[in-house]
Image (cartoon, rainbow, N blue to C red):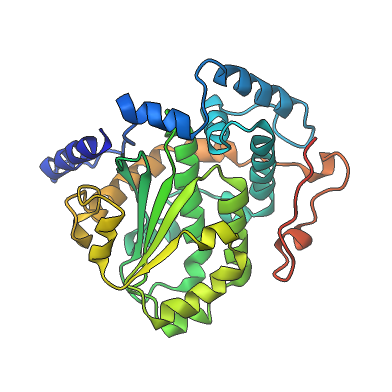
């Protein structure tokens, strides 16, 4: 099960404190959990290869999209779309569109660049290796000091989507959704004036429209009055169903009502891995993927070749406008 495998991962890390840290390995569901996830994802193992072939054929026929892409990534999109071919097409089109439209998120993705390395030493957002009993993946995010410049927001979003892209490849069996825990203890009033609503909107389009994420819960811990103000900046860019999945906690022990103690990192009163361990492991993984990220930079939508009207980025990202709906043939 996922929890036991997480304990093994943490144990290996703890025993090797004087050795180079290994890259994080995402525990894959098996047994009864695997069967339940297949039902939740609407995945039929007898027809999924046919669905994959259909998506690959559709991709080849889109002049503005790449002719081919990694099979594991495409399968992750099918799972994130509950095997609805039309929904999968919409998400893929938006994903490649965002890769072209947001170079601040999708270009120069070398984790060894000074600004990215420094950011990972001052803020942590690791996806944990294990799974909850429901087959969900958990990610904890926190800043380590209050002096983190909110101008680093684009780089933080870049790293989040780098981890997301690795998961497109490495979630081999699929998961039953994601849970995010955001530690708000370092948010201070001066941060609010530096936050870019445009950057937040772009990121939320990626999360809600472009990535095959089944976001089940978002927990804001160490919540305070200033967190309410910060949430009001983000709230206009959230879909209604997303708003209903956000929970605020002043007491971190409340997390144990939603996430098993065996999964929760030790920094938050759990028995799981330490945030530092998993963050270092992800740093190693991101280093291993540097050549792959470089190859991926040119895999994006070409608006000059899109049939019909090209995507209007101003319309797509306009703070006062609604999300543009792409038309998929």
The number of numbered badges drawn on the structure is: 0
Residue 50 percent across, percent down from the top left: 61, 17
Residue at (48% x, 50% y) in the render: 215
Using residue 312 as the reference point, say whether residue 235 is left or right of it. Answer: left
Measured from the top left, where is residue 196 in percent x and y? 58, 72
In front of the other: 87 or 62 = 87
Q: Is residue 235 left or right of residue 285?
A: right
Q: Name the residue at the left extreme.
A: 15
Q: Residue at x 23, y 35 (%)?
A: 5
x and y percentages locating residue 155 in the rendered image:
49, 60
Q: Quadrant of residue 47?
A: top right
In the image, residue 58 above or below residue 141: above
Residue at image location 46% in from the left, 39% down from the top: 166
Indicate the quadrant where residue 246 lies.
bottom left
Report the quarter where the N terminus lies: top left
Q: Residue at x 57, y 65 (%)?
A: 200
């Amino acid at each position: 099960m996922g929890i036991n495998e997480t304990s093994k991962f943490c144990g290996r890390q703890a025993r090797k404190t004087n050795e180079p840290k290994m890259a994080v390995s995402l525990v894959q569901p098996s047994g009864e959990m695997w069967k339940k996830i297949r039902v939740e994802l609407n995945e039929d193992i007898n027809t999924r290869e046919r669905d994959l072939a259909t998506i690959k054929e559709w991709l080849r026929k889109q002049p503005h999209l790449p002719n081919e892409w990694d099979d594991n990534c495409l399968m992750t999109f099918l799972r994130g779309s509950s095997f609805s071919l039309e929904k999968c097409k919409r998400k893929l089109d938006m994903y490649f569109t965002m890769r072209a439209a947001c170079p601040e998120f999708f270009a120069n993705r070398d984790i060894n660049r000074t600004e990215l390395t420094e950011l990972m030493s001052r803020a942590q957002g690791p996806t944990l290796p294990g799974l909850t009993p429901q087959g969900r993946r958990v990610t904890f995010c926190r800043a380590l000091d209050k002096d983190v410049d909110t101008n680093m927001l684009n780089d933080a979003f870049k790293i989040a989507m780098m981890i997301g892209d690795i998961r497109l490849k490495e979630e081999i069996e699929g998961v039953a959704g994601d849970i995010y825990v955001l530690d708000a203890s370092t948010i201070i009033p001066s941060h609010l004036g530096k936050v870019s609503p445009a950057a937040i909107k772009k990121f939320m389009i990626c999360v809600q429209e472009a990535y095959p994420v089944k976001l089940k819960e978002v927990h804001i811990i160490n919540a305070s009055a200033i967190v309410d103000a910060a949430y009001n900046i983000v709230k206009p860019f959230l879909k209604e169903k997303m708003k209903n999945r956000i929970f605020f906690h002043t007491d971190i022990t409340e997390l144990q009502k939603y996430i098993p103690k065996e999964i929760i990192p030790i920094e938050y009163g759990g028995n799981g891995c330490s945030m530092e361990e998993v963050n270092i492991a992800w740093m190693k993984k991101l280093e291993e993927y540097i050549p792959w990220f470089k190859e991926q930079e040119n895999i994006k939508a070409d608006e000059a070749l899109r049939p019909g009207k090209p995507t209007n980025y101003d319309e797509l990202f306009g703070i006062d406008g609604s999300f543009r709906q792409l038309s998929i043939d």
